[in-house]
Image (cartoon, rainbow, N blue to C red):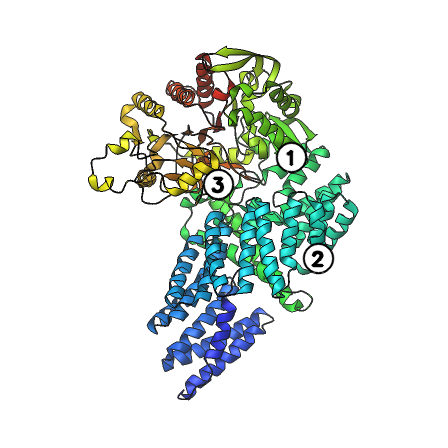
Amino acid sequence: MKDTAIQIVVLLAALALLPAPGLCQSEADGIQLFREAFALYNKAQSPADTQRAMDKYEQALRIFERAGFKKGIGWVVNNMACICQESGKYDRAMELYEKSLDICLGLKDRAGEGRTLNNMANVYLPWGKYDEALELYEKSLTISRELKDRAKEGGTLNNMGLVYTEWGKYDKAMELYEESLAIRRELKDKVGEGRTLINIGEVLQYRGEHDKAREYFQQGLAIWTDIKVPTRWPKALIADTYMDTGDLAKAEPLVRDSNYSKSWARFYLLKRDFAKAGQQYEKILSSGKKNRNVENLLTGHTGLGKVSEAQEEYEKAAEHYEKAMQLVEEMRSSLVPAQRVNFFAVRVNGFLRSEPAAGLTRVRMKLGKDMASIDASELTRARAFADGLAQRSAKGVPDSVLKEEEQLVIRIAVLKKNRSNTPEQTKPDVYDNLTRQINAVEKEHKEFVEMLRKKYPSYAAVKYPQPVRPKNSALKPEECVVLFDVSGEGVCVKLIRGKKTVQSFYTDWPGADLQAKVRRFRRAFDDLKPREFDPALGQMLYQRLLLPVLVQVPDGTPLIIIPQGVLSILSFEALVVNGTATWTSGPNGDYPTGITYLGDKHPISYYQSINALHLARTIEAKKPTGDRSLIVADPVFDTSDTRARKQTDRKLAAQWRDLPGHLMSFEKQTGLSFRRLKLTENLATALKQQNPSRTDTLLGMDATKANLMKMKQRLDRYRNIIFATHGYFGTDLPGIQEPVLALTLVNQGKEDEGFLRMSEVTGLSLNADVVALTACQSGLGRNLSGEGVMSMGRAFQYAGARSVLMSLWAVDEQASVNLIEAFFKYLKAGKSKLEALNLARAQIRKDGYENPYFWAPFILVGETQ
């Protein structure tokens, strides 16, 4: 919930310009026009009324300018900017705010300067320009602190927290909310304190920390109850936390007290009382149609789709899911790329935005419509990847065209927001006017997109992707694709060959059980206990997930796996096809014999979606790669390292420090520490010897993030990039909370300077054929629904790498060094990437690393040739 500023400023303007002794007649006339404009805009029923208000403001402005009445000019310009802002004319709003800001600076009106900066920041938010918004909020915050205006300071901190929340940077949002909370409590601002507590709870809920979220919601609820502020909203949020964890008994009284249809609908759906759930979702849908509330429409159609599917009314379910999916696409198309990063991970009244597509995929499979089910599933897959391609493809599009596109998208978004806030029953004329404007601008946008498809096809293909069916895709006729669609109810599996779906099946498999089975299969690897590998479980997973579609696929046929959900952390190579395991001792520990792995029968690579494959092959493949290699290896993690002690600069020596406090906390929380990876120095030496004149290295004390970022503009010249270091996929690294690669940590300027974050990787511009990550757990990351696992590996794809060789669990250093060295040796010998990986695997298995713990974690994502 945001602390708003625009309406307050307008009201203050009206009060500040009351006639005062000494004003000349012209100034008094200007003030009267200002009042009339203010009143007219407040009662505006149509765009014509708004324009009349703007005309009166223009007249008042001319009068004030002739009279040199600076204060009046500032207020009029500010109000005109507010109107432009609310109408979605952001460029004009910013011009006017800039003028208002100049006047405030001239008058040394620091309070007015702070308000204007806040309003300018609010313009940037729907624009998706988070950096610019935060810069302005920071300036406003400085002024509030200078004026000792604690209330404004607390409100600005809260708004900055909301920016970071919307951006998906939850750790920073929490930090700002905590600061805001301290100020609210100091000022005894109970309403603001409750609001901030609830904002914190929502961040925790987004993270999946339901118990902690509930604690904050309950604190906010207690405060608002005490001061008699309506409490339906926090009660509904608390009920959601109980429903998220399946505790319906505790959710029910809160659902009853809050009495929202959306809460009752979700409660009955989870209780499997489909008749009552259907009644509530019909009510929500009816309300959505009446008020054109997109969230209610989405909730109603998705809920009725779930109800119809549960009652085996598949045609009806498909109809509702399809309508919901169209609404999701409409919502997403109105956002700029910066706002889309977590789009499908957002829940709307209990449903992920990806649920309509997942539901439509399921019911179409159940109806025997295999090809149509692929269309549905492809719409939510790898969309972040496509957005990354769109931003890179935009380089060939004139700035004027991109600007026109941005303005059209913003106008549609603002008009729809205004319509959703306009009650159709009490303001039918305003509502109808807004609908007509929306239809007109959407028509204009549709024509604009058609122009993009003709003049800038590469950009249009990724910015406005259309479902790519296998027969129209860049799949090669001989390629075999296994496509998985995973939902909470079951798994759809399709085999595509010769650009046709040749076989498919659907298996009921509750999401919780599937996830438990996959994680149990991984446990031996995650716990570094190779002897506990369970071949029988590996065979069961193979039989349920793959056997029906692979029965007639000849041995040796390469497979492209397109996983989803929890299957994205499964090394399919390690699944067991047949045999009975007998354990044998080897030079590197015990390993099972007498069994055949899927990786023995089929070379396997991975892709995010058919659409991602198509875009990468038709757009990215056209760019020539460089001919150099970059190796980042053997970083320094501790000042006790002898390489750190060899520093000759005494001044720098005085600045050395041990691992920062947040690293100590990291080790305590996770039980993991960053030990030196000495063997990676040998790897760097061996790889450099393969091509000495065309290989650059960052080793030891030079393997810093600062040095890497200095090369940022030159990274696109590297054909191969290798990171031989530690990785951590969790979101509990204090102050960071996203997947990272650990580079040299000592003697860095900031606490997190030694960590290359996943979000920083996505901002790089690469043109690499292969990025190899030998880091532990580099293939894992936060599970973004509809995007698969948004891992560090996929972040490098997003940045422009054609293929990523990455690990799915903590790897043995010697085995991984041997495998990576062999992989690049075979590549240099002319083998394809997939051939090189399989030969490298075979080599280390022959050398005694036979347990799949050693050879199965490394997977190839992306192109194999």
Earlier-in-chain disc, 3 versus 1: 1
Q: What's the mark number on residue 257?
A: 2
Earlier-in-chain disc, 2 versus 1: 2
Q: Position of residue 89 (x, y in %)?
A: 48, 62
| 257, 186: nearer the viewer | 186
Discs 2/1, front: 2
Residue 639 can be seen, yes or no: yes
Kindly indicate whether the residue at mark 1 contacts the one at mark 2 (C-beta within 8 angstroms): no
Q: Is residue 411 above or below residue 550?
A: below
Tell how many labels: 3
State the CA–CA distance, disc 3 to disc 2: 35 Å
Q: What residue appears at the point 49 percent right and 83 percent down from the top-left corner?
A: 32
Which residue, given by chain and number where applicable, does mark 1 sit on? 512
Secondary structure, mark 1, is: helix
State the CA–CA distance, disc 2 to disc 1: 30 Å
Q: What residue appears at the point 65 percent right and 18 percent down from the top-left corner?
A: 551
Which residue, given by chain and number where applicable, does mark 3 sit on? 732
Amino acid on which the number 2 mark rests in the picture = Asp
Q: Position of residue 816 (x, y in %)?
A: 42, 22
Q: Left or right: where does residue 509 sit relative to residue 465?
A: right
Kindly indicate whether the residue at mark 1 contacts the one at mark 3 (C-beta within 8 angstroms): no
Amino acid on which the number 1 mark rests in the picture = Ala
Question: The C terminus is located in which quarter?
Answer: top left
Discs 3/1, front: 3
Amino acid on which the number 3 mark rests in the picture = Asp
Secondary structure, mark 3, is: loop
| 364, 169: nearer the viewer | 169
Earlier-in-chain disc, 3 versus 2: 2
Secondary structure, mark 2, is: helix
